[in-house]
Image: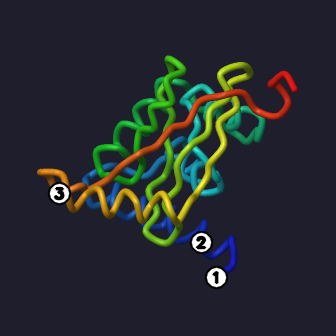
Amino acid sequence: MTAKARTIGWADRAEAALAAAGHRRGGARHAVLELLDGQRCALTALEIEDALRARGGSRRVSRASVYRILDELERLRLVQRVETGQAMVRYERVSEREEHHHHLVCDECGLVMPFSDAGLERAIDRLSKTVPLTVSEHEIVLHGACRDCRDD
């Protein structure tokens, strides 16, 4: 599947879910959906606002609108909060087609990078069979210093 087909799929699904929940279509919402659809990793509301401003366009999307749209998307389980411990919540689209990933956080410069590890996922699956609850989701955030920030 091409990246463009994947992008269109999530945005279309999100638009349909929002419409089914009674939300009207709007330019700000469409801009946020398009932006999130093209992202590889979690963004803060401020990063979303800045990226939309950098893209330009006929209409500026306010920070309040970004937060409102993110809240709507989170309620519909179309985005998830990613807590990276940086005093700012990040948001990431929920996609049924993409591989689950976790996050690496540089405590020096704030860089957030996605990572996947099949062995880690197998270990979590094994662990989930031994704990007294059904694990429905999980998030791993590893902190350290990136290659640019660490002292070698």
Front: mark 3 or 1: 3
Is 49 placed left or right of 129 in the picture?
Answer: right
- Which numbered dot is residue 134? 3
- Which numbered dot is residue 6? 2
> Contact, CB < 8 Å: mark 2 with mark 1?
yes
Is 103 placed left or right of 81 in the picture?
Answer: right
Is 149 placed left or right of 14 in the picture?
Answer: right
Please state which of residues 59 and 7 is positioned toward the viewer in this rendering.
7
**Where 90 falls versus 123 (above or below)?**
above
Q: Residue at x 59, y 32 (%)?
A: 61
Q: CA distance from mark 2 to mark 1?
A: 7 Å
Q: Residue at x 44, y 56 (%)?
A: 94
Q: Residue at x 55, y 36 (%)?
A: 142
Q: CA distance from mark 3 to mark 1?
A: 32 Å
Of pointers 3 and 2, the one earlier in the residue sequence: 2
Q: Amino acid at mark 3?
A: Thr
- Name the spot of residue 131 as percent of width and height, x first: 18, 51
Please state which of residues 31 and 128 is positioned toward the viewer in this rendering.
128
Q: Secondary structure at mark 1?
A: loop
Q: Secondary structure at mark 2?
A: helix
Residue 80: image quadrant is: top left
Question: Crowdedness of circle 2 by 10 Å Cα count: few (<14), some, many (20+)?
Answer: some
Q: Amino acid at mark 2?
A: Arg
Question: Crowdedness of circle 1 by 10 Å Cα count: few (<14), some, many (20+)?
Answer: few
- Which numbered dot is residue 26? none
The residue tagged 1 is 1
- Name the spot of residue 60 as percent of width and height, x first: 64, 31
Question: Crowdedness of circle 3 by 10 Å Cα count: few (<14), some, many (20+)?
Answer: few
Of pointers 2 and 1, the one earlier in the residue sequence: 1
Of pointers 3 and 1, the one earlier in the residue sequence: 1
> Contact, CB < 8 Å: mark 3 with mark 2?
no
